[in-house]
Image (cartoon, rainbow, N blue to C red):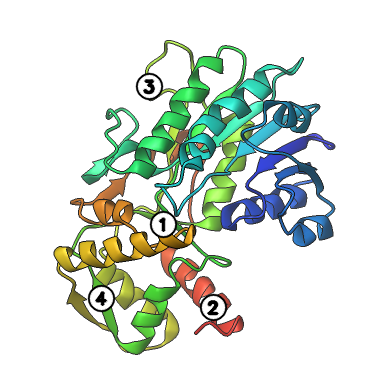
Amino acid sequence: MEQNRTALVTGGTGFIGSRLVEALVASGREVRCLVRATSNTAALEALGVECVVGDLRDAESLERACCGVVEVYHLAALLKAPWHPEFTAVTAEGCGRIAAACAAQETPPELVLVSSLAAAGPSLEGRDEERPAAPISRYGRAKLAGEEAARPYADRVPLTIIRPPLVFGEGDRSLLPVFRMAQRGVVIAPGKAPLSMIHVTDLVTCLIAAADRGERVGVGAKPARGVYFVADELPRQLGQLGTEIASALGSRPPRTIRLPLPALWAAAAASEAWGRLRGRPTLLNLDKVCEAGAPGWVCTAAKAREQLGFAPAPFGERLASTAAWYQAEGLL
């Protein structure tokens, strides 16, 4: 790869974005991050990253951020407040605005858009890119809308869409409750739905590969063109995941308790009401329970393996490194 290849990352202060920035810097790229005025940029600046203040609702700031870059990785989105008025503006409309900003450049950069398996919808047998999208949650519909908002610019912008499932790894705290339950010997699961997962390091490697050599979306082309699912080969039920986590922690296999879905709906309704009242996002909300009630969230990464050389590390190793990070941080 040529030196002085400049990449722009949106969402660079987040869990996945921060790991992507580290990998891009290590690859020899110059890195620029679009950040909000209130963002804590100390970690980015320590890596020598250029921070550009802007907003996904401000087209002018996006054009400034895209000026002179060769590739753009768009990760910024709202995750935990699907009822918020800004949810669609940031998660969906922001994708169209960043694509438009790329198209406005004299030489449009490659754009890697990080979407979600939620945009495609649930599947028990293993969803591939050819299957029509059918999201069931507000989050999934917003992510799909973001993809659709970017597609009209694909005649000018080399665009690739990545749809990861549940992402875990060092720096993430969303899966911490499952690690804690496994450590204590009891995992409370809302059902037996299998879940595809991917470690953040494997996802980041795939994002960079997509920018380097990924298939591109085409205007008027089949919807599957330029789209990739990336996931570990084997899906896992939450109870099975708890057993593997316990093994990584050197603990006994935990007991799994099935939580009735009506109880989860009630808890989510209360949590979302409290979040709305306080004006703050909440991890447990009605949208997430809607997804939890699906028969499964399983996808296949066969296309990514074939075209991008996607080869995730052994899942047990990834769980062990995640557990070690939680322990080092004093979280377990």
Above or below residue 307? Residue 232 is below
The residue sitting at 25% across, 64% down in the picture is 237
Q: Which residue is mark 4?
A: 188
Frontmost of labels 4 and 2 is 4
Residue 7 in percent (x, y) is at 73, 37
Q: Amino acid at mark 3?
A: Pro
Q: Which residue is mark 1?
A: 276
Q: Which residue is mark 2?
A: 326
Residue 179 is drawn in which quadrant? Answer: bottom left
| Helix, strand or loop for disc 3 | loop
Q: CA distance from mark 4 to mark 2?
A: 20 Å
Local packing at callout 4 (Cα closer than 10 Å; few below 14, some 14-19, many 20+) is some
Q: Which mark is residue 156?
A: none
Residue 166 appears in the picture as rendered:
yes
Q: How many marks?
A: 4
Give the mark nearest the N terminus, 4 or 3: 4
Q: What's the amino acid at mark 1?
A: Arg
Which label lies toward us, 1 or 3? 1
